[in-house]
Image (cartoon, grey):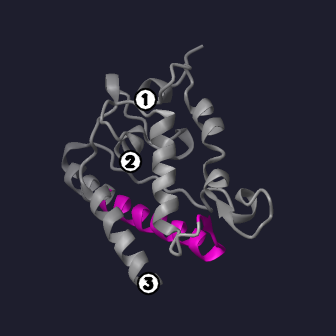
Amino acid sequence: MKKTLITALAATIALASASTFAYAAKDGDKRGGGRHGPNIERMLEKLDANNDGDISLAEIKTHQENIFASVDADDDNSLTQEEFEMISEMRKAEREANKQQRTETAQSNDNDGKRGGKGKRGGKRGPSFDRLDADNSGGITLTEFTGHADKMFKRMDRNSDGVINSDDMKRKNG
């Protein structure tokens, strides 16, 4: 059952990730991910539910709620360690799909001198189970799971306009 669920979720993520990016960055800002910051194209594809080119706090919370619901296999509104680890499996499948897409893009761009997405990030991503389980109950509630969204959103909304978009990803001059 668990293997089937993970496989189905991975296939869904792979299909969504395999499509071309919904938005190119505005004003020619094509900064990628890695140590330079998040890849805005991927963020928009993943989080911009209404396709307006902006990511709102509500869209981020909805995305988190959907992730939570998709891995809460027993529907008890709390994630066990095993359920939480399914998120890592989903992310791994998504990274593999993105890697495949970057490889295909790099191969198609080899003859025109464009750089392919060859950046590589190592290490564990995302908060740990223990860090999210604020009350040490052995389970992560939806409130605990989404609790860091406000802080993360504020940090990423560099121009404080209430949305995250390519304007927030540009380097500040001076």
Q: Which residue is mark 1?
A: 165
Whether 26 is drawn above or below 23: the answer is above
Tell me what residue is drawn at x 58 percent, y 60 percent: 122
Q: Amino acid at mark 3?
A: Lys
The quadrant where residue 76 appears: bottom right
Tell me what residue is drawn at x 38 percent, y 70 percent: 10
The quadrant where residue 44 appears: top left
**52 with respect to 36 (left or right):** left
Q: Secondary structure at mark 2?
A: helix
Residue 80 sits inside the magenta stretch: yes
Q: Amino acid at mark 2?
A: Lys
Residue 85 sits inside the magenta stretch: yes
The quadrant where residue 78 appears: bottom right
The numbered mark, 3 or 1, whose residue comes first in the sequence reads 3
The numbered mark, 2 or 3, whose residue comes first in the sequence reads 3
In the image, the segment drawn in magenta is: 77-101
